[in-house]
């Protein structure tokens, strides 16, 4: 029986919950998540837990922040003058925006405060500092992809390690 290992493609159904039991993401009602193992597409702890599993095998595990999206870093909250914001942008607290690194890479950020003079953004991953519990089932193992590779397919960019 084939086992999950680096270099192969794995399809997995999953449900992720926070400590309080709230579901933050799930593949229910969507295609399973398909990733190439060892390619850095998953948070470290999730990928480690998948290793060695077989098709139809189920598992529940909990990841501390260090194995998931890391601890929150308050240095990743920054203020920008409102004068730097293009006038056609209608910013709102809670809105996700994309900033740009010095290397030109996009950096997702959430607006956490607005006033007439400044906008405060938080560049921490939304799940940083959280302990995450996952219920997973391996539904496919293949040497080649079986789905179009467009991120994790969840629509919220929470599983890829490159958020």
Image: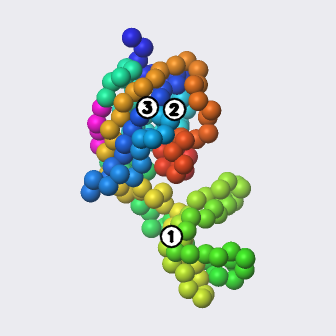
Q: Nearer the viewer, residue 77 or 62?
A: 62
Q: Quadrant of the N terminus?
A: top left
Task: Between residue 18 and residue 65, name the one nearer to us.
Answer: 18
Question: Which image quadrant for residue 36?
Answer: top right
Residue where numbered disc 2 is placed = 34
Q: Of helix, strand and loop, which one carries label 3? A: strand
Q: What segment carries the magenta color?
A: 59-63
All told, the count of numbered labels is 3
Is residue 19 one of those drawn in magenta? no
- Tag 1 or tag 2, which sits nearer the N-term? 2
Task: Determine which quarter of the picture holds residue 84.
Answer: bottom right
Residue 94's tag is 1
| Circle nearer the N terminus (3, 2) | 3
| Residue 39 position in % (x across, y down) | 55, 32
Query: What separation in Å lies between label 3 and label 1 (alpha carbons)?
Result: 30 Å
The reply, left or right, for residue 48 in relation to residue 115 is: left
């Amino acid at each position: 029986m084939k086992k999950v290992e680096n270099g192969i493609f794995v399809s997995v159904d999953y449900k992720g919950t926070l400590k309080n039991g709230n579901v933050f993401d799930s593949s229910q009602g969507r295609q399973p998540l398909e990733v190439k193992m060892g390619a850095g597409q998953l948070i470290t702890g999730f990928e480690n837990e998948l290793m060695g599993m077989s098709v139809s095998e189920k598992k529940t595990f909990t990841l501390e922040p260090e194995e998931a999206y890391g601890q929150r870093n308050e240095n990743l909250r920054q203020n920008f003058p409102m004068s730097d914001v293009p006038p056609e942008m209608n910013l709102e607290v809670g809105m996700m925006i994309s900033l740009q690194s010095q290397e030109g890479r996009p950096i997702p950020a959430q607006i956490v405060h607005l006033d007439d003079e400044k906008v405060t953004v938080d560049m921490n991953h939304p799940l940083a500092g959280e302990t995450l519990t996952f219920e997973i089932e391996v539904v496919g193992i293949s040497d080649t992809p079986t789905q179009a590779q467009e991120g994790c397919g969840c629509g919220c960019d929470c599983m890829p390690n490159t958020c």
